[in-house]
Structures are given as C-alpha cells and as structure tokens.
Amino acid sequence: MTDELSRNEHIKQASQFLRGTLAEGLTDSSTGAIAEDDQQLVKFHGMYMQDDRDLRPERTRKKMEKAFSFMIRVRMPGGVVTPQQWLALDHIARTYGNGTMRLTTRQTVQLHGIIKSNLKAMMREIDAVLLDSIAACGDVNRNVMCNPNPSESRAHAAAIELARAISAHLTPRTPAYREIWLDGEKIAGGEEEVVEPIYGKTYLPRKFKIVVAVPPSNDVDIFAHDLGYIAIRDGAGEVVGWNVTAGGGMGMTHGEPETYPRTADMLGFIGTADAVKVAEAVVTVQRDWGNRANRKHARLKYTIEDRGLDAFRAEVERRAGVTFGAARPFTFTSTGDRYGWTHGDNGSSHLTLFVENGRIHDVGGKQQMSALRRIAELHDGDFRVTANQNLIIANVPADKQTEIHWIAKEAGLLAPWSGLRRNAMACVALPTCGLALAESERYLPSLIDALDGSLAAHGLSSDDIVIRMTGCPNGCARPYLAEIGLVGRGPGRYNLYLGAAFDGSRLSKLYLPDVDHDGIVAALDPIFKAYAAGREKGERFGDFTIRAGFVAKTGNGADFHANTGALKQTVAA
Ligand code: SRM
Ligand code: SF4
C-alpha cells in the first residue's frame, strides 16, 4: 500500500469545506459542464454531472460538446416525504428535468437531466418544501435508510426516529451548500473542527451508508451497508434496543479479486440512548482508519478486514464509551416489499405500489407520474419510498382508499402476478450512468418476460424469486444479494450469479461469466425445472441452487471469488 493520498483527498483538502470553484462555474455559460475538481465536490451537494450516453456518437460526429446535465439526489431519511414535497419533486422533474422521477434502492428520489443554468432555481424549489440534497452523495454519510413498514407503526416510529436522529447528527455542517445554491450569506471558513466537528476538512475516505431494519423484514438489505441497526422488540412489541452490524458493501471491479462484496458483521447489542453515539464513533474510526490512498480499498468493509473485527469493535467502544452486549436473537424472512393494502396497529391503512425499477413516467397506457400527482393532490398522509424502488402511500383514511386504489390500478401501479417481477430490481445504468458497461433498467423488464415464460412452463409463475441486475459491478441494485444476480460486463453481456439467501443474509456466487440474453435464459431454464421437481417444502430458490449442487456457497468477503463457476453445467458456456 502506498502512503500517497488519492486525488480526491487533495480536492477535498483544497475545497474550503466543499466550495471549490462551484459558485463561479455555475455562471460560466460557455459550457454545460463544471470544472473537473468541482465534479467531485458537487457530489457532496447531492449532484452528479452526467451526459446522455445515447447522444454521444451523434454529438461526437457533429463535434459538439457532450449533452451535459445533472442528476440530483434528494436526502430523505427513511424515504418519507409529504404529498407537498412529492408535488414539488414532480414539478421539478417536469420543469427542469427529463420528465421522469426515479425511486432509488436507498429510498431517495433522483431527478435526471437538469441543465446547469437551471440548477439554482431547482435547488430553491427543493429548499422551499424543506428538503435538501446535502450529503445525498459524496464521501460522507448518505441518506439514512429505514424499514418503511407502516403497519408495524410503533416499531417503525422508533426506527424512523433513530434514522432521522442519525441523519441529523451526521449531516455535514459546511455553510457552502446554502451559500452556493441558495445565495446564503458567505460565512468565513473558520477552524476545521468548528465547521465540521465530526468530519474535519477531508470528510470520510469514501461513501458511508447507514440503515435501520425492523425484523422480520430485511427490506433495507442491512448486510449490504457500512453500518446497520436491527430493532429488537420485547414481547409487547416495544423496541428495547438495537443489534448493530458493520462492514457491509457491494462494490467490486471485474478482474480485481482484491475487491469484493461483503456482508456486514455483528458488533453486538446496544440501548437506544447509545445509538447515535455509536454511529458517530463508527464514522470517526472509519474517518481515521480508512484507506485514503486507494479509493478501491477505502470502504469500511476493507478497514474491518484489515484491522480485524475485534480491534474495530474495541475502538468503537472506546470512542463511544459504550460496551456492546451479546447480540439478541432476531429473524429475517425476506428482503421484498409487502404489496397491496396493509392495516396498521394504529388503525391506519397503507398501499404499497409496484414501480418497475423505480422509474416513474407517463408513457403509453401507463400515466404513472400523473397518477401519483393526482394521489398527492388528494392525499394527506405521506409517501414512503422503499429500498426496493417501490412506493407506499401511507396513512390513508378509509374515505380515500377506494379512489386512491383505482387511480393506482388504472396506472398499472398495483403489483404484477409474476413472482419474479415482484422481486426484481435494476440499477439506472444507461443512458445516464457514466460507469455503466451494459443496459440494466431498460433491459431487465424484457428479460423477465422471457424468464416468466420459462417459469410458467415449470409451474413457478407466482413463486417469489429475487432477481436483480446492474449495468456494472458497482452493485447499485445489490445484485450479489439476489437469488439471481446479473452484472453487466459489456454491451448485452452479463455475469450470472446464483445462490444468495432470500432473507439477504448470504452473498451469491458466480455461476456463468459473460453471457448474453439467450445464454441467461438457456442457463436458468433447466435450473427452474430442477427446482420445480426437486425442492424441499418451503425451500427457496437460492438455497436450492446450493443444495442441488449448481453453485458453491459463499461465506463472506474474499470467499466471494473462491470456487466460482457452474459446479453442475446446465448449458455450454
Ligand atoms: Fe450507486 C455510483 C446509482 C445505490 C454502489 N451509483 C453510482 C452512480 C452515481 C454513478 C457514478 O458514480 O457516476 C450511479 C448514478 C446512476 C444514475 O444515472 O442515476 C449510481 N446507486 C445508484 C442508484 C440510483 C441505483 C438505483 O437504481 O436505484 C442508487 C442510489 C442510492 C441513493 O439514493 O443513495 C444507488 N450504489 C447503490 C448501492 C445500494 C445501496 O447502497 O444499498 C450500492 C452498493 C452498496 C455499496 O455502497 O457498497 C452502490 N454506486 C455504488 C458504487 C460502488 C461503491 C464501492 O464501494 O465500490 C459506485 C461507484 C463508486 O462509488 O465509485 C456507485
Ligand atoms: Fe451505474 Fe454500475 Fe451503479 Fe448501475 S451499478 S447505476 S451501471 S454505477
């Protein structure tokens, strides 16, 4: 390992707490872009500079600048927004963006296609409804996720309260955000510990992600995250404290086995009063121990692997002044959403909608943007984005249920019959993601059409099987925790992973590398057939693929790359 700091560390160091030359860059009308270093800094403000990759060849031919625009990601702990906030996001998407809204795998909303000259007007609209985008991206704690399950309202109340408290505590303090986007008064830089008492001048070595889960649902995929809290309840359903997990992450790079996805380890049990203290301690240990030379080895998962879990736990305990108790028993049953109507223990009702791959738009017969706008106009409960890219219309009074139900049904927002589609997620990928190697969001629906044919032939149409696709190995749709994972390698080609646990507790294993559409369908059909014929009672598809000998079981971390490949060949690779 070299001691030299990565380029991003120098950019942060010189940025005066995330200012860089962003303010000046916004006024430069000669280009739709911003300066290279500012492209890194703008992430901390919740934005990515992108270009429409569909338009690249034509614009290159015409010797034009790339079609630059910005993606904005809103910070909304636990995925909760009011109908007024929803309407503001809808308005921004239609006025400044590409006319679509994108629910993300981390319970936020992304708006794509906003050109530079519209950024400040857009940020003002976000601010006007008391939302912001600070720290939605960048080397800081991101949007804090939490189980959105409104029907368990007491446990959910505790979970969202914790998610909000952690989010508030770990939000960067720099005044740069208000100064740049909202023309706030310029405040002098000051001493670093005053400006950013937790992060300091160079923030964290890498992105940092926190989740709060309420068993039995693992819909937030707790083991994929840097830091996680699992609600532990007493016999009366009250939350008595939290099991804390650390060191999960998905990102890796093809062909670099020293990078790997990893499921989080258990640190132990703590009471609610210690939860925020522990979050701060974990973050500061990672701030000080994390690798600042190599960004591919900078996530907390590698810090824990390098230093050892015991040393890491001891340092967190020392800094927080807290001793972890033995982890308390809990059971997760699934990572999916519960579609349709649920009724809470406080008498309220909630409707979980199916939004295919999180993309909300008005196309063809499906006027989903308009439908959700109508719902927001008549609804006075709240909207909750799930970690599966879906949406819950929460706290609906009895007199509004029929109308909301029919608006959603007409727009095709009720869950489909296919067990595969109900449990599918795809990352954004092309045309906006600069890192995509293959299609994902635009392709997965048609792959599911094909796989549904095969599942129907084997009588498995309505079986819940988790499938996730990403356009590259970064893992934005958490594909390595899916029973069927597809990860882009190049145009039209994917690595096929099998064998993850249905409850999100075990990573998958590479089954076939570099396969195309026909190869994927041909490889899976005989496995579906074998599953239909040979599964044990209640046996999940992921568990079956291991027991039946199709793939080896993945333990943790580096073991992901061991013993890969089809143990039992179904088709020629
Ligand atoms: Fe992600 C980078 C989209 C969740 C791991 N992710 C990106 C960027 C910003 C591409 C870039 O850096 O230029 C993508 C923007 C695409 C676009 O056009 O919108 C992008 N990530 C997404 C979203 C929108 C996927 C989705 O379809 O919903 C998710 C937004 C979450 C949010 O609201 O905050 C999203 N990304 C995730 C997750 C899932 C999660 O956190 O539960 C992961 C895996 C978990 C993890 O962090 O380990 C994830 N994204 C990455 C990585 C790899 C990180 C790593 O440790 O190696 C990158 C690339 C990077 O950071 O260098 C990345
Ligand atoms: Fe882009 Fe890769 Fe993330 Fe998909 S997984 S959104 S292709 S970075």
Image (cartoon, rainbow, N blue to C red):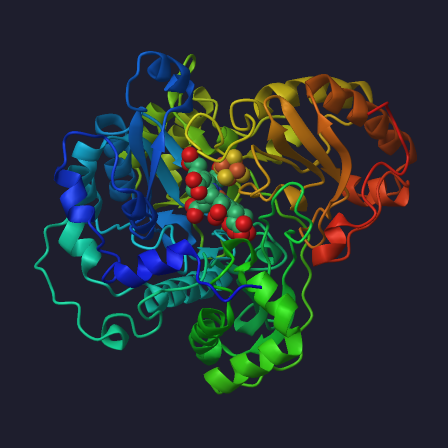
* Location of the N terminus (image quadrant): bottom right
Residue 186 image offset from top left, x and y in percent: 9, 60
Residue 217 image offset from top left, x and y in percent: 60, 53
Residue 455 image offset from top left, x and y in percent: 76, 23
Q: Taking 98 as reference, is 484 above or below it? A: below
Residue placed most toward the observer, 192 or 444: 192
Residue 429 image offset from top left, x and y in percent: 49, 31
Can residue 327 be spotted in the picture?
A: no
The residue at 27%/76% (across/down) is: 193
Q: Taking 145 as reference, is 367 above or below it? A: above
**Taking 173 as reference, is 461 left or right?**
right
**Taking 103 as reference, is 535 left or right?**
right
Can residue 173 be spotted in the picture?
A: yes
The residue at 78%/39% (across/down) is: 541
Quadrant of the rendered image containing residue 422: top right
Residue placed most toward the observer, 154 or 17: 17
**Taking 527 as reference, is 152 left or right?**
left
Quadrant of the rendered image containing residue 55: top left
The residue at 38%/53% (across/down) is: 138
Residue placed most toward the observer, 96 or 513: 513
Quadrant of the rendered image containing residue 515: top right
